[in-house]
Amino acid sequence: MVVRKKVSKVEAVSLDCTKLEILKESLSVDGEGEAYLLAQTLRDSLCQTDPVQQIQLVKKAGTLLEQLREDSPPPDSLLHACLETLSVMYTSLQNKNPLKRAVASALSSVPVWLQEGSVGSLSVCLSDSLSTLGPDQYPHLTDCIASFLDGFPIGERCIHRLLTEVLQFLQKALAEYLQTNSGLTGQHVAQAQLMQSTLAAVKASMLVVQRSQEFIGIAVQEAQAQRPLLDALCELLHCHSRILTDEEFVQAVQSTAGMAVVLLTRSMLGNAEQVAEVLADMLLLPEEGDAAPMWLKESCAGLYQTGRPAAVSLYLCHGALAMLTWQGGLLGPQMERLLLLLPPTLLALDTSVKESSTAMVVARVLALWSGAALDSLQGEPRSPVLQEALQGEAELPGRLREHVYSHWEHPLDGVRHQTRNLFRNLLRMHQLCTGAANLTSDPFVVRLTQSLLGLEWHSRGKYGSLGCLVEHLGAEHLLALEPTLPALLLSLMGDQTLAPYASDLLEKLFVSHRAELSLREEAGPAWMDCWHRTWVEPLLEILCQARLDQTTYILDYFLPRLLRCSPASLGHMVQALLDTPVCVKGSYGSRGALGALMTCLRAARAQGVLRPAEERLWEGMVPLPLLRQAVVHKHDQVRMDALGLLCESHRSTEILSAPEMDLIRHFLPHNLNSQSPGVRQQTVSLFKKLLCRMKDSAQLVQKRTAQSQGDGDTLGAYQAFLHWLCETLFQALHVGASFSSALMALQLLGLVAEFFTFSSESGGFALGRSVSHAHAQAVLRCLASNFLEVKQLASALLQKLPASAVGLTEPHRMRMLLRVALDLSTSTKPFDSVTAAHLINHMVHLEGMQEALVHCAQEQGLSTPPPSADGPQASAASILERNTLAVVWVLLRCLQAEVIQAESSLLQAAASHPLYGRVHCITASLQQLGTGSLVLIGQWRSLVVELIATSYRMSDVVSPVVQSSSPEGLIPMDPESETAADLQRILEEIQPRDSNHFFAGARELDSQSGTGTIAPATPVPEVDGTGGDGEAYRVTAQMVLVCCWRSMKEVSMLLGQVCQTMPLQGSGPGVDSVITEEQAEGVGRYFRGQLLQSRHRGAFELAYVGFVRLTDVLCRRGSQILQQLPARWLREVLEEVKRSDPSSKLCATRRSAGIPFYIQALLSSEPKSSSCSLLKTTMRELTALAMPPRAATPHGSTVPQVHALNILRALYRDTRLGENVMPFVADGVQAAVLGFTSPVWAVRNSSTLLFSTLITRIFGVKRGKDEHSKKNRMTGREFFTRFPALYPFLLGQLEEAAMSVESDSGKVKLHPSLYLLLLVLGRLYPSPMDGSCSPLGLATFLPFIIKCGRSAVYRTRQMAARALVPFVSVTQLPSTIGALLEDLPVGPGPQVQQNHIHGTLLQVLHLLSSYHAEAHRSHSEAGWGGDSVVIALQPRLWLATRTNPCLVTRASMLDLLGSLCAWERTPADAPVLSQLCEEALSILMESELVSADAPRPPSSPGAAQYLLSLARLAVSAALERPELWGVGERGPQLLGRLLQCPHHEVRLLVLEEVLKELEGLAEGSSQRRPVSTFLEQSACSLTTMALQEKHPQCLEKVLQVLSKVTLASILPWRDGTSALTHAEALDRLLALAEGSVHSVNLHCAALALTSQLLLYLAEGGFQQAGSDVVPIVSRWGALMSRCCGEEQPMEVKLAAADILVNSTPGVLASAGLPLGLSNTVALWRSLFTLLQDEDREVRDRASDFATAIPRHLLDPQEGVPDAVCPPVALELGLRLLCRLFEEWGQVPAGVLILTDWLLGEGEPEVSPVKTPGLDEEFLFEKGELNLWAEPLKWAWLLHRHLCPLLRVADMAGVEPGPLEELFARAGACAEASGQMLQALPALPQFSCTAEHERLTVTNQRACSALEVLGLLQPEQNTS
């Protein structure tokens, strides 16, 4: 990217007239010599107005000054005049003006003898300016002072001469700024300017002090003589300290002021030790401190107050680190004390500073401190104090590492970056303190490395810290500790949030590893193979076998870095992938070796590692057939990688080769119709690169051709390729084209127009000649698309097509199109108005638009024509402005007439001409008008006045509906039961019913009121069923509501557009305004009313959009009065919210309706760079309002609290406020939790919504299906560090809630906010970095959470168990579990509390589950006391037996036993665990579920849970770890016993586990024998269950299990003791499939098993099934056809696709036709239906049939197809079917079948003429939206394959009967559709789009069928 360098603006000198004349007169001296020439030159420069000429003259004057000689000096007066002129010029110019630099150069060039005079003259001039200029010139003078010290020696001498005066001026300026700042609240622009001025003044004062250290030092020594200077310094110090303590200043100013305070203190004290002592006292604020002198305490009085802001310490620390010297030599004791004091001071801010921006400063200052500490350790000898305090195991580095662990997941990138720097510097400090050259054996570093590797990999901060360890330890050390690290990190690349971090760590690892291997002497040349095995081979494996969604980011983040590190590895990658066998497949959805090859090659070419022209890529390295397969591969990313390989290049001028163009020709037709937005975006992006490359390389070839060095064939190939590209894209815009095809074609055509233009000139590629009239009409037809994106792209493309091709220059056609557009603007279907707007927007660019408007205005009956402008219409901008003005005028006049009619009858307006269409067209016309250069200001001004007035009037008409209590339910939805008069009466009666009276007291229903209707107050006029013009119309509730809320929406958008684009009064000097301040304020009041009173969400959401535009304009472009309006409106609405006035019109329901939107818009207008005072004030007031009142008032209203909660929710959700709301999150959580204690439902409801929003804001958007995934959790340390105020609050609330939990009394006591507390605590998790104790005291939560487990509420016990996990560290786990188990009774007794037992067991179970999930850490296993847990559990095993009467606790105990015994890391020979398994197995065998002697299974509550726990234990013993349980041969018998259980839950569990085991066997991941033995022994039971099972889910699982086993092992089929024949089994399974359509999953399972059995029998030719199978096959074929229908669920279609793919080799492509011709062709038709299905997954699954085609049926030149995309599979399947017709000898029948498919459904239905207005019931019905299928394209494909089929064989065998019937059908269809097309109105593609499209497609299909049949008839006649 080329970055244009900013050029400073040159301005001429602008002086006061009097001063200018004085200077000119002083220079007007006659004489000769260099001095007189100098004076004349300067005088000429003053007379010049051209700044460039002034620069030249000043440079000439500088040369003349340099030539002056001391021996012949000029007159003093003349010399003084020259120097004064230059000085005045210098001080009057702005800093960035090049002329000022020229003057400084001239003054610097004076000879030595004249320098003192120059300094004196410049000093006088500066002194005069400092003393005479007012506050408005302070910024200029500040910049001027800074420029004096910017490489200008004479200026620096002036500053030294005027040091006291300069410092006094800067103090005066800062004092002025301090005073002014307090009165600028709400004036964002002025406040931002003041912050810039203050920052510049503080920086200038620091610069002056730094450059004047010598003079200040002298002044300190001579205190009495230099009193004014010292006083100025003290006053300046006072101003800086005031800025530090004033929180209204932005951080940049305060941070700079902190540095200035330290600098001034250092300059005036001098001694570094004393400075350090003073700063330490200033930070600590001791009660008795004598280090600071009195003058310093007086100057910095605010800094010594205990109530100062917390951030003051932060800025002082920053100043100390930046302004003091920490390098070289030993520091003094006070400096060492200060250095060690700074980190604790900064760390204390972690829990007191709330703003994220301040946290960023803390992190940056800590990183700065670590750099200073490193500097202090660099010198020799090192301080022993610092060495002891800064080595890794000391207290201070430990606290700093805890800061790192708490902030490495911070939402701000800058904080994470600085914590990583801090961690790196801590490692360096440890190395310097210990003096170790190698840290790999250091105990501290080893422990740190192990703890980091033991962390969860979802923790993003872990990666940066490991990267720091790689820098210090090397990659080999980490690989030795964790050999699987490369594969592990690569597996994490599928997560978008982790991919950047994982790739950074991977890069550091492989770069370090490569360097280490290359330096080994003994490695030899084989070290590269070792590197490839470590890094390249895991990459290739995951690329080949992992799913595509897991490898998306490898291409973006990892692969390019690997290739840049080792370009030579590309050859190894390519060879390894080419050698990979085709049969090696990865998981379903993986890209395979071909996709991996494309990925690697693409990355290599994009990085410049691969150059096809130099390395013969297409001919040598990669075979072209492979590339042809890749560009049409089934998987999107493989195709994109292949296209990227073709399009991307390291050089933009690389010539496109012929193979590349051929491959793109092969790619494009099959990839235009992609449903994936990501694929479309990538395709367009890559084609943009391709076209850019073509353009650049074509220019290079043209240049070479002109020099007789180029090849002319390249340009010819380019031209042919571009013409083919345009033709292909225009053809894709055919009638009935899908959305994705049209969108892609228009986007690519737009790129072609952008790079090459559609011109017909012979100089270029002449692409305009490829655009025919039909092509342009296809683009124009896209304006009627139902999709907005297509309309927008088509509209933009039409502007670039040749006007002759579009054909709108003819007046008649333009009038016709304009008439259609005006008609569509009054349509009752909302999307028609969008079409109208695009049509009008296209025509306003044409010259004949005004005449067409005059004609249409006359047709509309407008009294006066639109205003026609005088003068020639020369430029395109002028034409656009005049036409837009005329269009808006006509639309406004029409709108005004329709508003008048709507005022009399809103129902008639809604039914015949809703208002919103006209307004939408007006808004769209204004959007494309460049309002910055309007010419017709007067006409626009009057038009805007009318627009605003009409908008208000229109709003008044429709606002009663959107402001009613229930807009959606306003009118009954049954149009037959309500007459128009009833609707009119309701419209007149509506009034808002949800005022604040609703909350003032209790409401009771009036039992005396009847059900009759209320009589209207005024007579109701009779409303006829016809409009004024006699046309019938019918109104529905939907039409009225849509008319009203869309009208409000469009009014809001129009007013927002007008205010945003039209010039506003006060925008700037020289700007002709169209909108006045009064109008802008009036629009604001309008928006206020709509947002605060509208009830319909659609209305106030769009009003919010318009209001945001207005507030943005007011704050940035308005006058000072307008800038203060948002702050004033905000104060007013907050006051209204605070008042609990029942008469308030604010909506108290619907989540406060538009009130949150209104406040959001006002707050979002506040500049982000400001101090955000409005936001902070609003958040504080709303938080206080949201808190429950301290004392309940008898008549208090809760409406303000509800409003506050709803508004806070909206503000927390607003992403534009970003991190600015984070300081108030803790307060919001408190308000939400306390809101649950309210007795009012509305408060509790709003609190719930607020709490949900805050959980998302704190823990992030849910990033997985698992509700408790750690991706949406954080450690307790991080949570309470970021929100310290929640620690005491949550603890107090939890204690209060725990006190209310007591199940002993038998009463349920549920604290209102207990669920919320447990939800928050349950989202925390422990970190191994926390250690055994935490500084935040998390252990204090433990007893209360444990006590919550005793609740009588089941859900509370569950949540308490989950919330307990974060507060128990790994080291405390055994003791905590032991204590919990000890609390359980060892035997039954009267005091046993089952709730207590259940809660305790749940807590133990969750702790064990958490440990098992985390047990990959090496140090965690060392601290695990599993034996002690088992020992404590054994005396309490009675809880799992029938001795325990409670089934729920019995089940929990069984689950605990299963968790202990099933953990895979437990060794099988562990004696304690083996004993526990024996006891558990005995309990299981004696249970009701297994033992025959046991009583029947209980039916009390908890029975299902208990039986499931027993079943899980049995499955674990029989399938998972039989060697540990010692079940032996009893395992399969045990499972068989469970399958006979009467409880379906048990059977379902067993079947699910067996199915899981079978899937593991199929994938090769498990080789367990128990499941195989079970299937062998239970085959009869399973087949019997398949026929007799009644429970649908169990039946489904049985069928799925049987589908996984080989059919030979279960045939013959048995039903109990009897064996069924194959036909009987097939018949019963088919009946089951036919009768199970009510259950999708069961239907799919039955269909799959039935089809599997039928295909198995078909392979044997049905010899074993007999003749009875023939009707069954027909039934199965019909069922398959139904299952492939469009209306079927996706799961059914996927099952059908799998069946068809499996049947391809044995049935579909079989030469023997085992199912017969009709059934086989029906299956092919089903396959083609699935290949055109709307569900992408169905199409992809069906396309897999291509991989199952027998080899002998394939074209040997194309090879064996890999997985291909559905369009290619469709074409391949049709070609294969035609070939099969030849092999079957059924070509005549095949021709008739394909022709029938081509004709389609047949003759179109002739619909009667509809009455206008009666088809409007479904306003949003857009007709058939073809999202993917394109019937016309399918017809073309059939026609293309039918024609060759007619020539391959003798067609004499065609039966005449079916042929004649087809011919008659096709003829009738063509004739009927042609007549109906002619009967449509003018331009039907816009007025009746869907009908026109349907008839056109039908007609073209019929004509194609007639063409084919016409080729058959001559053969029939000759025969």
Image (tube, rainbow, N blue to C red):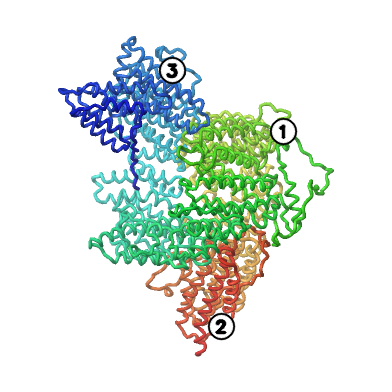
Is residue 1766 or residue 1456 the one in the foreground? 1766
Q: Nearer the viewer, mark 3 or mark 1?
A: 3
Amino acid type at image mark 1: Ser
Which disc is residue 973 wearing?
Answer: none
Is 1488 above or below relative to 1363?
below
> What secondary structure is found at the residue carrying circle 1?
loop
Q: Nearer the viewer, mark 1 or mark 2?
A: 2
Which disc is residue 1859 wearing?
Answer: 2
Separation of marks 3 and 1 at Cα, in angstroms: 64 Å
Q: Label 1 neighbourhood size at 10 Å, few (<14), some (14-19), many (20+)?
A: few
Tell me if 1919 is positioned left or right of 1499 in this view. left
Which residue occupies the extreme front position in the image?
30
Is residue 477 or residue 612 the one in the foreground? 612
Which residue occupies the extreme top position in the image?
224
- Going from N to C along the chain, the mark reached first, 1 or 2, is 1
Quadrant position of residue 239: top left
Is 273 above or below relative to 805?
above
Residue designated by label 1: 1305
Residue designated by label 3: 300
- Going from N to C along the chain, the mark reached first, 2 or 3, is 3
Residue at image x 32%, y 45%? 511
